[in-house]
Amino acid sequence: MPREMNTNRDDTMGRFEGKVAVVTGAGAGIGKACALAIAREGGRVVVADIDDSAATACTAQIAAETGHALTLAVDIADAQAVAALFETAERHFGGIDLLVNNASAMHLTPRDRAILDLDLAVWDQTMATNLRGTLLCCRQAIPRMIARGGGAIVNMSSCQGLSGDTALTSYAASKAAMNMLSTSLATQYGRAQIRCNAVAPGLIMTERLLAKLDERLQRQLHRHQLLAHVGRPEDVAALVVFLLSDDAAFITGQVVCIDGGMLAHLPTYADGGNNPAERPVDSVDEAPFAQER
Ligand SMILES: NC(=O)c1ccc[n+]([C@@H]2O[C@H](COP(=O)([O-])OP(=O)(O)OC[C@H]3O[C@@H](n4cnc5c(N)ncnc54)[C@H](O)[C@@H]3O)[C@@H](O)[C@H]2O)c1
């Protein structure tokens, strides 16, 4: 069933009127959807991305929808650049209330293999961007949020940080560590009125994945979803808006899955249920269970 995107400011509730948000990796995919959704709720948005032209296009779209946004080019792995980002954002908009740590080194994932096949440079760069970059942004945001009487942070994790896989070792470890970083932040700064939650998406069909995702892998992942439709960036943005808003005023320290039910079932579901006759033709190869231990 086609679902329409909410692009009309009049349909929103103005939940971020007077608030300033920094969204990293806001030039494309989920980050862009978050930046647009926050602006539609009245928030002023710092569109931060390593890709200046992508960020500029997102800012232009927000401006065209009568929102307020500022493009700032940044590599979140670079501590000096992150400090400059927050200083400029504060100077421009007067403070920081909301932060979405969305940027990740997605370009490294095709080289992110199983433990013994892993190039350590991929591990180091993944951790430097996803985990350390998120920490750097949090360290810049927290004192500024405290100065405004509080704030809210969402860290973009992944289902990969909650389940093992045959590859993506570094990515998964970085996302699991981001979950714990979120919990630590929520614990340490809750009394300063800062909430922090992690969001763990399953398969979300961004432009990048639409162009690149192998069809067999796509089918395999869909077979494990409980819902038939694909996940879209706007689905994740709706959750992020909720978690950043006062509607979630009593929610902190959580990891919230948004995966169409990918992690919510037993193996029987994807492999044809308890009736062998219903087994799908493209089910995974059967390896015999070891009978002895
Ligand atoms: N798409 C999915 O299926 C999916 C699933 C689970 C989790 N996620 C997470 O969602 C987030 C966004 O993923 P996406 O699929 O929208 O990615 P995407 O590749 O579509 O967009 C990522 C954006 O981040 C920017 N970026 C990359 N490195 C950066 C850096 N060092 N500094 C600043 N900006 C940088 C890119 O330029 C790009 O605009 C990531 O954290 C990813 O791990 C995505």
Image (cartoon, helix red, strand yellow):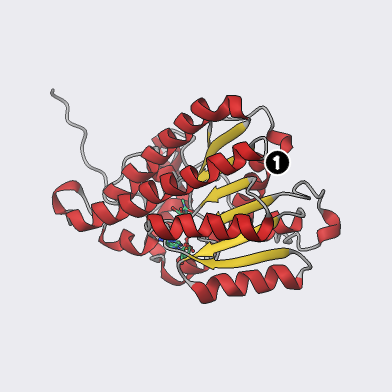
From this viewpoint, which residue is outermost toward the right?
A: 10
To which quarter of the image does residue 142 belong?
A: top right
Quadrant that contains the C terminus: top left
The residue carrying mark 1 has its beta carbon less than 8 Å from ligand 1: no
From the viewer's side, name the closer residue of 212 and 124: 124
Residue shown at the point (65%, 45%) measured from the top left: 97
* Residue 139 placement (x, y as % from top left): 47, 43
Q: What residue is disc 1 on?
A: 245
Q: Is residue 47 left or right of residue 270?
A: right
* Residue 169 placement (x, y as % from top left): 27, 47
* Residue 92 placement (x, y as % from top left): 65, 61
Q: State whether residue 137 is above or below residue 192.
A: below
To which quarter of the image does residue 252 belong?
A: top right
Amino acid marked by disc 1: Ser
From the viewer's side, name the closer residue of 11 and 148: 148
* Residue 87 placement (x, y as % from top left): 54, 56
From the viewer's side, name the closer residue of 154 and 8: 154
Residue shown at the point (74%, 48%) measured from the top left: 16
Residue shown at the point (49%, 27%) measured from the top left: 188
> Is residue 145 among the parts visible in the rendering?
yes
Q: State whether residue 225 is above or below residue 265.
A: below
Q: State whether residue 105 is above or below residue 130.
A: below
Quadrant that contains the N terminus: bottom right
> Is residue 33 among the parts visible in the rendering?
no
User: Crowdedness of circle 1 by 10 Å Cα count: few (<14), some, many (20+)?
Assistant: some
Helix, strand or loop status at disc 1: loop
What count of labels does the image hold? Answer: 1
From the viewer's side, name the closer residue of 114 and 72: 72
